[in-house]
Amino acid sequence: MKNRLTKLVFVAVLPVAMFATFGLVRTLAVESVVPEPGPNVLRRLTRYEYDRTLSALIGLEVKSSEDVGMPADTTSSHFDNLAVNLNVPPSLLEKYENQADHVLERLVGDEKGRVTEIGDHWAAQKSHDEIFLKKQLNGATTRDAADQILQRFATIAYRRPVAANELEPMLRLFELGQKRAMSFEKSVALSLKAIMLSPNFLFRMERDAPESPAGGVTPVDDVALASRLSYFLWSSPPDAELMKVAESKHLGQPAEYEKQIIRMLADPKAKALTENFAGQWLQIRNLPKARPSQEFFPTFDSSLREAMYNETSMFFDNLRTANRPVLDLLESDYTFLNDNLAKHYGVAGVTGEKLRLVKLKPEDHRGGMLGMGSVLSMTSHTYRTSPTLRGKWILEVIFGTPPPPPPPGVSQIANEAGLAKKGTTFRELMVTHASQPACAGCHKFIDPMGFTLENYDAIGRWRTKQGDKPLDASGQLPTGEKLNGVDELKDLVVKRKPQFVRNMAEQMLVYAIGRETISTDKPALDRIVKNYADDWYSFQRLVLEVANSAPFRYRHNSGPVQLVPVKKIPAVKPKPTSNSKAIPNGKGK
Amino acid sequence: MDFGNRPLTRRTVLKGAGAMLSLPFLEAMLPSRASASVAPPKRLGIFSVTGGTVLESWKPSTVGPLGKLPSILRPLDGLQSDFMVLSGLSNSGNCDSLNGHENCAYKHLTAVDFAKKEGGKIFAGVSLDQCLAQRLGDQSYLPSIEMGINLNLYSFRDANTPVFSEANPRFVFDRMFRGRKPVVPNWFARTGKAVLPANVEVGTGNPDQGVIDVLLEQAKDLRRQLGRDDQQKLDGYLSSVHSVEGRMRRLEARLRQELLDAQNPGPSKLVKPTLYPENIPFYKISGEVERDPEKHGEYIAILSDLMVLAFQTDSTRVVTLAAGSDEAHFPGVITVGYETHCHTLEHQGNADRVENADPVAREACRQIHTWYTSLFAETVRKMKSIDEGGSSLLDNTTLLYTSYMSDGGHGMSNYPVVLAGRGGGTLKPGKHIDFGKDVPMSNLYTELINNMGVKCEEFGNNKSTKNVMFGGRLPGLG
């Protein structure tokens, strides 16, 4: 397939429903390669995005899960932002309605325009004054005044310019309120509520390009592209600058596009890539539910857990802000520690509560995700390690090859509680379990890598003995390769880095485009992987390449598919990221 | 509980006032002909626990009349004439791209033969509760209530649309009674009188209706600009707007009915749940629930009280209560061994075959399940004590106790099933029926749907599984 692609044009056909029919893929001999963006998806804001979007809109922090019990979104393939799962069932619309009411209760003032919020009264009053254009309107309460308020509010809410006639129905609501002798602000609030419940707000609407035929492939227009970018990098709506560039139709120009992405990556809002993307992909969102209990591990308290979460989170942030090679996730000679965590790890010389970058020595046995307390704890059981869960985490998260779930009706390790009595080690029991015919097929893939992490106990402390027995941290892969201990595991993982590099690119692409990848995405993915691998696996370069890929930059017009060549968007060529070249990765690997 | 102290929202004040003013008018408008007698309606409550059961400590050793109960069922001792135990019911079939918990959860109340994820999208089927909500939803204020800290998905509107479970009791309560005082319907007094319609047009001058109209208009405009798949998504949004509109109308009707009921309320007292203080964020409470069985028990008791209150006030007729959590710890409830994490114990001790299980962990599982049934028994007793005018709330209800897995090893054979109550005369409790082996759960669900007065021949896999039995029905319950 790759061969064919390099030579020929490749146009796939639009309707999502026709996926099964990839036989329809056609080739055309024209000069430029037509990018294939894959199916269009209509994405509702996820809860995380909704909170941030509503917060940006009203200028006050919104936490809808606490305010109204907004439910979490369905997670598939690591992520909760896949369009297929983002619908608006009645129960959800009810929550949006409650949240809109909740917001308006905070924002709408009394007869004199004073908000009644007790908490942060000043902030609420400021938001109120901004939304109701207090300065500009000077006390006017006319239909025209309402129109101005709505114009501003809807433009931010819809993340695009709003046509005057679009607001007509909203203004009718304002008039309805006035007719019922409601105050000016309460009448306007009716319209604000309708805007907050509008599909234009709740969904990321993208319009067809009118000049192109039905089904044709066109570059995403600048305004829609601004939203694609801002939700990818920030999980938030575009800010004023991005919107301005988009409306002036300059965003699609390579230099400007890159400039904006670099700017956005440096913005604190880009921490969303850590919280939302990495939090889900690396599964560290699960850390609060890690099983090891304080009964068995008295030091595993909330402050240690928090330090573990922050270590991973700051590590990932650092990939972005210092533009590090993503291979640091596999192996690095630094990490982020505070006194508590350093003591836990046995790393000397770290003081203070605040986490900071710490250089590691080989005898520290840390570096990369595999030495992090977060990963090691959340893959453990209440009182012991789980080589299986650790092995599964490596296969799933690092390599993107999750093992199949255990068949129904399987037991866990038999007679575990009788360990001491019989004098068998846990490892021996586990080997027995994993050699049962029903289990062996998978466990031989899953467990060996987990066993090599046995030097870390259930909460990630380094150990060389288990009870009074010497510790066995060896494992044999199905390929026959033998590994002993975490260092050899890391060597193996680094050796297999192409698999990791591709997996990370794919995860980021899935996250960015809100759907699972399909066969037509292969050329795009190949290109992303090649280009960022050529650039020292730079994190920035990865983001730039994903943001510049065909599925991200193009879309199909709705309607039957047309085989029409479109102008190819020139590739973004980021300047060599000197930063990443200056610092060789990890221990020089 | 501070029933009266909730701040009134603008809407409720408006509506309340409107309904109050129009009351005399309403009475004048009552049709003079007497309608059929009004009995208390039938309700279905699903009390679903995690981790299945421990069969040898659950299944009564004899069939027929219930006598001495096995240890897990023992908390129900004394209620033998109010419940029945059903054995030999199973789900079956295959799945694709699901883990063991998802497979069991998606099939739990849908009883489909096949479930999967494709392109990240879920494919299951309509669940028992949602099927009833769709058919009966118009008769009470809320079509259904789903509640509990549920890490899985049990309820489905359609094959692809899961219904989330409301974890915070306060939001469940607000959804039923926001700004109003709960009133007990006097079913008996309604007999012989006209029944008010279950939903009433709100009128175009109403601001809430105005908002709805604008949303509908806008969505219809947008729809024309979208491709077919996106249109479907927007159709989902549209139908949700309609459903919010429907709730508004039912609220309007309810306010009128409550004004009548309040003058002559039913005989029973309200069981008022004690909600958590409003100033504590719920995530703190839910965190404690998973680590401390005492808090966990309190939490399930509050949900049970809410279910009882919902039925008693006819706020809904269908409730799914997800009790327990695979991720919970049970120190104190468990007195053996040193593991307290439910999920770990399920795997160690709750395998399908006793000989595969670790005995200590299995005992721990038995203790957890006994703890679950003790909470369920409390609910049954509470409902039994509520008089609806000649019959108890329990008499008019079917309370289904089951689990999303049949055992801790992701099993789907031999589910624990208890039916408490008389289902408004459709059930004859007091017995143990053993159906032998692998009679589909869908047969039970089909029977329960019909018992609720909804005609239904086919549900889940009752007509499509490879072992269709009893024509897809379940004999002997009545």
Image (spheres, coloured by chain):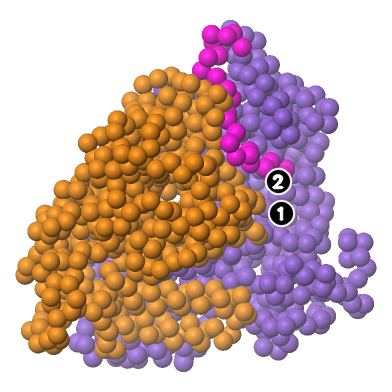
Whether the magenta-drawn stretch holds residue A165 is answered as no
* Chain A image colour: purple
Q: Chain of mark 1?
A: A
Residue under the image location 14 percent in, 81 percent down: B34
Q: Which residues are magenta?
A: A399-424
| Residue situated in front as seen by the camera: A270 or A359 | A270
| Residue situated in front as seen by the camera: B201 or B394 | B394
Whether the magenta-drawn stretch holds residue A414 is answered as yes
Secondary element under disc 2, as helix, strand or loop, is loop
Location of residue B229 in the rendering, given as x and y in whole percent from the top left corner: 61, 75
Q: Quadrant of residue A167?
A: bottom left
Kind of residue indicated by mark 1: Glu
Q: Is residue A474 left or right of residue B461?
A: right
Secondary element under disc 1, as helix, strand or loop, is helix
Q: Which mark is residue A400?
A: 2
The disc, 2 or 1, on the residue closer to the chain's N-terminal end is 2
Q: Which chain is orange?
A: B
Residue A450's place in the image compared with B460, above or below, is above
Q: Is residue B14 left or right of residue B129?
A: left
Q: Chain of mark 2?
A: A
* Residue A430 appears anywhere in the view: yes
- Name the residue beneath numbered marker 1: A506
Kind of residue indicated by mark 2: Gly
Residue under the image location 29 percent in, 33 percent down: B67
Location of residue A152 in the rendering, given as x and y in whole percent from the top left corner: 43, 80
